[in-house]
Amino acid sequence: MPIRPFLDRDDAFGPEDIAKMSAAFEAALHKLGLVDRCDPATMAVAKLIIEFAKVGERDPERLCDLAVQQLSN
């Protein structure tokens, strides 16, 4: 599932950024064992990845790790 539906019309990200964020999103969902796209935890993962990207992080692995770490605390 792409992360685009969670972006709330945010035009700050280009197609390459969105692709990287989507990869991070999918990886984080897999690591967390989340399969239900309607689960509130899924939205939490998306929001975290978007927030980390807004402050400049673009590496998909790092975005994934940051989101997983944040939700695991």
Image: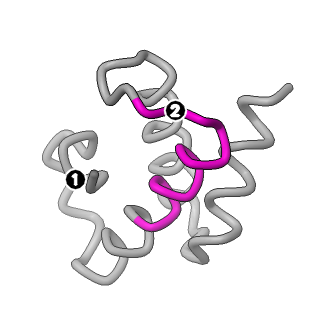
Q: Amino acid at mark 1?
A: Arg
Q: Residue at x 19, y 39 (%)?
A: 8
Q: Amino acid at mark 2?
A: Leu
For disc 1, the marked residue is: 4
Measure how far apart labels 1 and 2 are at the Cα level. Answer: 18 Å
Check the image and report above or below for 64 versus 58. Answer: above
Q: Secondary structure at mark 1?
A: helix
Q: Residue furthest left?
A: 9
Check the image and report above or below for 59 versus 66. Answer: below
Identify the disc placed on residue 34: 2
Q: Residue furthest top?
A: 40
Q: Residue at x 45, y 50 (%)?
A: 50
Residues shaded magenta = 23-35
Identify the disc placed on residue 44: none
Left or right of 22, for residue 34? right
Check the image and report above or below for 67 versus 20. Answer: above
Left or right of 36, for residue 30? right
The residue nearer to you, when weighing 42 against 16, is 42
Q: Residue at x 63, y 57 (%)?
A: 64
Q: Residue at x 13, y 47 (%)?
A: 9
Left or right of 9, for residue 35? right
Choose top left, top right, bottom left or bottom right for residue 71.
Answer: top right
Location of residue 4 in the rendering, given as x and y in whole percent from the top left corner: 22, 53
Q: Secondary structure at mark 2?
A: loop
